[in-house]
Structures are given as structure tokens and as C-alpha cells.
Image (spheres, grey):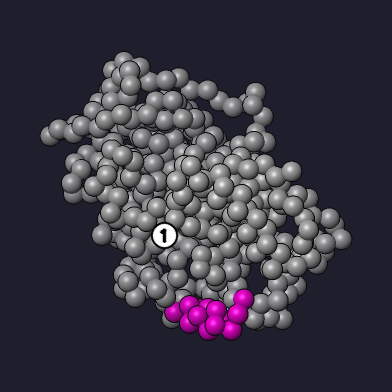
Amino acid sequence: MTKYGRSPWIERFPKSRVPSYPRQRGRIETEVAIVGGGLTGCATAYALGAAGVNVVVLEADQIGRGAAGSGPGWIADDPGVSFAELTQLLGARPARRAWHAWHRAGLDFAALLRRLKIQCSLEPHGSVTVAMSAEQAVRLAREQKTRRDAGLDAPLLTARTLGPDVGLAAPAGIRVRDGATIDPYRAALGLAAAAVKRGARLFERSPAMRIRFGRRNVDVQTSVGTIRAARVVVATGWPTPLFKALRRHFWFRHTYLALTAPVPARIRQHLGRRDAVVRDSANPPHIVRWVGEDRLLITGADSESASDRQRSKVLVQRTGQLMYELSTLYPDISGIPAEYGWDGAYARTGDGLPYIGPHRNYPHHLFAFGDASHGATGGYLASRILLRHHLGELEPADEAFGFR
């Protein structure tokens, strides 16, 4: 029977090992206050702590149980938008810089998880973006040419190669060799623990009720306390009600995820080598990867965010849709049920890149909003850009991720 609305990453984590952090109370002074205890917030807390910055993290619920614990767990090599389209919107040089920054962040994030010895099922997996129709193949060939012209590695695969590799009857594909998969909830918890070791103070069930800024500092008020900081980092993924004026920059959407029951070995042998994350060229795309040895995870069927009243009904419908669409990609799995079906909220910007950094209307604020990549790389990239903003050591590529 399908378990709806429950992320398997969180569901399967032993309850006895779930860390507990206190509620924020009283008055605290710090250099940086971070609002949001997801993967981005925890990675930023670690980065700031490692740089010797005094930091406090406020999480409205529990660490890692929001968007971080609902993701597909993919350290992607790219931001999930067409490089050709990004070049048209931003220009060749900014697009290339953004692409290189994302690629480097993916490699560095995997290296950090290894260095910190965070047990989050980290496994190296490249990716293959496939075209499933002649029209998609034309667009993919144009994408490949644009990448190659910009000096990016983008080998084009033929149908003969794709069959054995990913088990799909697709006319063309682009392979990327770098990338990895993780358990995103365990990764967030591990980064939180590493941040604490670097001196960060974490508070759960402590939502920011109000943020006021003056000439030299900012006050973040919770229900029973206040944090005074030189700077506040808002790492909530999208503008909360405290920042209604910024909502016009974003489209608010949900993506849906379904994890299959175990796939029998006699079927698995027909599904390719299972060593790559597969993304098709649909709009919105589907992302398919293996979890463990015998389960398939599919992400997709994105839609505008439903009302709370309709959310459960939409989730059941979208889970069924995802399983049908998975069976059109891999007909051999028809009849295998979904073990889990859940959703994740996100915000999308006009060009598809997240907005990371300051906004002119909010002094002493840094934001990390609008990562629509459906991967974990953006959270780590945001932590590095936010650190550079705080230290005043920006890189040229950081400009591509600013508010526009």
C-alpha cells in the first residue's frame, strides 16, 4: 500500500537517532543569524562557522524536514535549465560562468561530505539527459552544440549507446560523468552536526516572527526571544510572509516524487546498467534514479502549488501519473506499485537560476531563494556564495545568481 505524503528519507531514519535542538529563548547576540534549517541553512552555518563567524540558526520545525528531506537526493552537475536558453537570457559569458560554478559546487559538495564522513549513502553517479522524440532530439542537438561551442564537455550519445546504458529506446542523449546521489535528510543532519562542532548554535521549533533592521544591525524576533545580528541570512527557499514584496520574482510550484516497491531481479536486468541518473527532455522533465539496488525513484509532474485543502487529493493523482509515466519509459515495470508518494515545494525564477545574495530593499539581509533544480547542489553553492558575500570576497560568477 502506498504511503502518501511521507518522505522515505525521513520515514526510514531511526527515530531514536533524530537529533533534538532547543527552542530559542531570551536575547542572543551573534554575527550572523540564519533563518531556515534545511540543507542550504545547515551548509551555510557550517561554511560560516568554519570561517570563524559566530552564527545562529533558526528552524521553524525540525532540522532537515522541509524541502531538504523531500528532495530526490541528486548532486547534479548543472542547474537543470537549458544552457542554450540561459545563454540567450544572460549572455554567453555569464551563462558559462554560472554553469562552471554549478559544476564545481557539485564536485566540492561531494568532497565535503566525504571529508566530514557524513553517512548519507553518497555514491558517484553521472547523468544522462535523453530525448524521447524526434522534436526533443533536435532541441538536444542544439543544446549540445551550444555547450560545445562554449567549451563545455557534452558528448552526444546515440540510440545504440543509450539502450545498454540506461535501458531506454531514446534517439539521443547527453552524458555528464560527474555527479552523485545521496540521502538528503541524512546529509542535512550531518551538516547541522558539523556546524555545531564549528561553534554554530541551532534552534528548532523557533520560527522567525518578525525581522527589523536598523543602520548597523538586524533583530530577528521569535515567539519568546530576539536575536540581534550584524546580518541575517534567509535560507527558506522562497519568500515567506515576512518578504511579500519579493514574491513577484517567483513562480510557486510543487514537484512530485514516487518510489517504487522492489523491482524483481528478472526485470532489473532489462533496465540498463543503472549507474546514471536519467533526465528526459519533457517540460517539466522527469528525473529517474535508483535507490539502493532495487527501487526506482521518479521525480516530475510539476504543477502550480495546490491549496492545502486540495493537496492530498492532488498528491494521490500525481503519484499515479508518475507511475504511469515511469512505465512509459520502462514498460517492463508496469504493475509494480509505488511504495511512497510525496511532494516538495519550490519557487522558480524567470531564468531558472536561484537568486542568492542581497536585495537593495533589505539592508543587512542575504537571501537564498528560487532553486528549481530538484537537486542538492544548489544548497551547497548558495552556502559558498553567501559566505563570499559576508566576507566581501565575491567571484565573477556570483553575479549571475543575484537578483535581477
Q: What residue does disc 1 label?
A: 101
Tell me if residue 240 comes above or below residue 89 in the rendering: above
Q: Position of residue 29 (x, y in %)?
A: 27, 23
Q: Where is the C terminus found, in terms of image quarters?
A: bottom left
* Residue 110 visible, this angle: no
Q: Position of residue 346 (x, y in %)?
A: 44, 50
Mostly what secondary structure, the magenta segment? helix
Q: What's drawn in magenta, residue-wise? A: 132-146
User: Residue at point 49% right, 39% down?
Assistant: 66
Q: Amino acid at mark 1?
A: Ala
Q: Position of residue 129 (x, y in %)?
A: 58, 70
The residue closer to the viewer here, 333 or 93, is: 333
Look at the numbered disc 1 and give the secondary structure of its residue: helix
Other residues around mark 1 within 10 Å, as few (<14) / some (14–19) / many (≥20): many
Q: Where is the N terminus found, in terms of image quarters?
A: top right
Outermost residue to the top: 26
Q: Position of residue 2 (x, y in %)?
A: 70, 45
The residue closer to the viewer here, 141 or 3, is: 3
The residue closer to the viewer here, 140 or 241, is: 241
* Residue 347 located left or right of residue 328: left
* Residue 402 located left or right of residue 196: left
User: Residue at point 44% right, 79% down?
Assistant: 146
User: Residue at point 37% right, 29% down?
Assistant: 207
